[in-house]
Amino acid sequence: MEKKKFAASFSTGKDSSPALYKAIEAGMEPVGLITTYNTNAEKAWFHGVPEETLLRLSAALDIPIYLVRTDGTDYEEKFEETLRALKAHGAEYCVFGDIDLQQHRDWDEARCQAAGLHGCYPLWQMDRRRAVEEFLRAGFIARITTVNTKYMDASYLGEVLSEDLLKKLDAAGVDVCGENGEYHTLVTDGPLFQHPFTYTCGQVVYDHDYAKLQVR
């Protein structure tokens, strides 16, 4: 039987990566990764990863990446345009890493409907802590690269996710899954990778409430 083909909304972080992994484990075939790219900042939206780094990450996963290039004014239109491009390459579904925020899923569904694809949510309604613990048990490695300083101190930047760090976050009253935007990660190794992804960490920069670790 021919495998169901899909695009994957890929932020480079700890939610989109296991969603991609679960879809593949379920017998689906990835056509490409979709990453939104801020043309003003010249980095991925939200996770702040530059284009050259995204391309190397794509190579480590051996899955092509499609950048949704937008300054934010046409974000939805550009996302739908990219979904249609992946549909032309055979995708029937788009896989998302959302866990329990209905407004996020509603946005995803609207984009998929406009592009003629079906949404797929492998992590939907999982317990937040269980989702992160399962991610770690699967063998993924991720480092915190962005924190919202309203909820977390910038000293967390560069920390590798681990059971000990989850306990530390929990004790500090931080959602261990970071589902509300408390922190973002860069996944660098795990069962999806053909080889570990190598990168370098630069200085910390501040953007309004966010502290970001520069990675290349």
Image: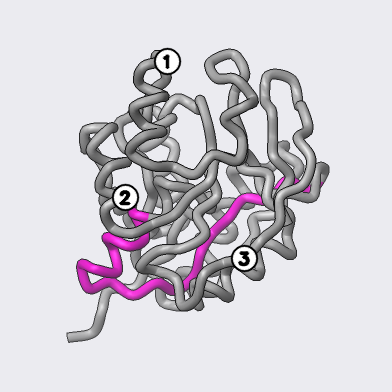
187 magenta-colored? no
Which numbered disc covers residue 172?
A: 1
Residue type at tag 1: Ala
**CA separation in Å, label 2 and label 3:** 20 Å
Q: Is residue 161 above or below residue 167?
A: below
Residue type at tag 3: Thr
Q: Is residue 70 visible?
A: no
**CA separation in Å, label 1 and label 3:** 30 Å
Q: Residue at x 53, y 46 (%)?
A: 143
Residue type at tag 2: Phe
Q: Indicate left or right for 32 with 165 as reference.
A: right
Which colour assignment does the render follow?
Answer: one colour
Q: Which residue, as the protein is rendered here, is positioned at the far bottom?
A: 1
Which stretch did the figure color magenta?
18-39
State the residue in front, 118 or 169. 169
Q: Which residue is mark 2?
A: 135
Q: Position of residue 122 (x, y in %)?
A: 26, 51
State the residue in front, 182 or 162. 162
Foreground tag (2 vs 3): 3
- Mark 2 or mark 3: name the one nearer the start of the chain: 2
